[in-house]
């Protein structure tokens, strides 16, 4: 059973790596044809996909250690930013600057964003 699980993990990691690499290739190709004022969109998305790719812990050698550290920091900072967004939204509601309905909508969006950073079992 453990062998099947390891095979699944390897298969999953390889699939995720291939998918993310294809997305990065698309972004690089699209960036070349993008209008100059839109290049930053492709750069931002590319950075996001590179961070996701780094999370796969592709390399275990000394050079590969920076990628997991980068991703860990990326996730930590992202979680802190989402917490700040949530606290600010509640504060706005408490100050009666936004409605309860808008707060629920914002919290739902934040919940979805936080789910991206949930630890995989």
Image (cartoon, rainbow, N blue to C red):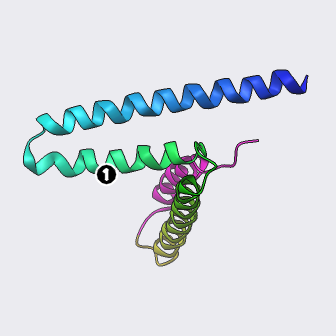
Which residue is drawn at the image coordinates 81% and 26% (left, top)? 5
- In this rendering, the answer to whether 2 lies above or below 104 is above
Which quadrant of the rendered structure holds the N terminus? top right
User: Magenta region's main secondary structure?
Assistant: helix
- Residue 90: x, y in percent? 53, 70
Crowding at dot 1, Cα within 10 Å, few <14 / some 14-19 / many 20+, comes out as: few
Q: Nearer the viewer, residue 118 or 1?
A: 1
Vertically, is 18 above or below 47?
above
Identify the image quadrant of residue 31.
top left
Answer left or right for 121 relative to 83. Answer: right
Q: Secondary structure at mark 1?
A: helix
Residue shown at the point (53%, 66%) measured from the top left: 86
Look at 54% across and 50% down and name the residue there. Answer: 108
- In the picture, the quarter occupied by the C terminus is top right
Is residue 34 shown left or right of residue 25? left
| Image point (43%, 46%), residue name | 50
Q: Left or right: 31 with respect to 77?
A: left
> Residue 77: where, in percent of width, then height?
52, 67
The verdict on residue 106 being magenta is: yes
Q: Is residue 33 left or right of residue 16?
A: left
Most extreme residue toward the front is 62
Depth check, front residue: 68 or 117: 68
Task: Name the residue carrying label 1.
Answer: 44
Q: Quick one: 115 or 90, which is closer to the camera?
A: 115
Q: Is residue 48 magenta?
A: no
For the image, the number of numbered tags is: 1
**Quadrant of the rendered image containing residue 27:** top left
Q: Magenta segment range?
A: 98-121
x then y, percent, for residue 3: 85, 24
């Amino acid at each position: 059973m453990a062998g099947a699980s390891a095979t699944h993990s390897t298969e999953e990691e390889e699939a995720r790596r291939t998918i993310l690499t294809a997305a990065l290739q698309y972004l690089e190709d699209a960036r070349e044809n993008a209008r100059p004022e839109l290049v930053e969109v492709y750069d931002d998305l590319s950075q996001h996909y590179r961070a996701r790719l780094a999370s796969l812990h592709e390399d275990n050698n000394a050079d590969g250690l920076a990628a997991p550290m980068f991703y860990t920091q990326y996730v930590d900072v992202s979680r802190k930013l989402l917490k700040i967004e949530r606290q600010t939204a509640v504060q706005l509601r408490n100050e009666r600057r936004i409605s309860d309905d808008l707060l629920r909508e914002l919290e739902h969006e934040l919940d979805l964003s936080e789910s991206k950073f949930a630890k995989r079992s």
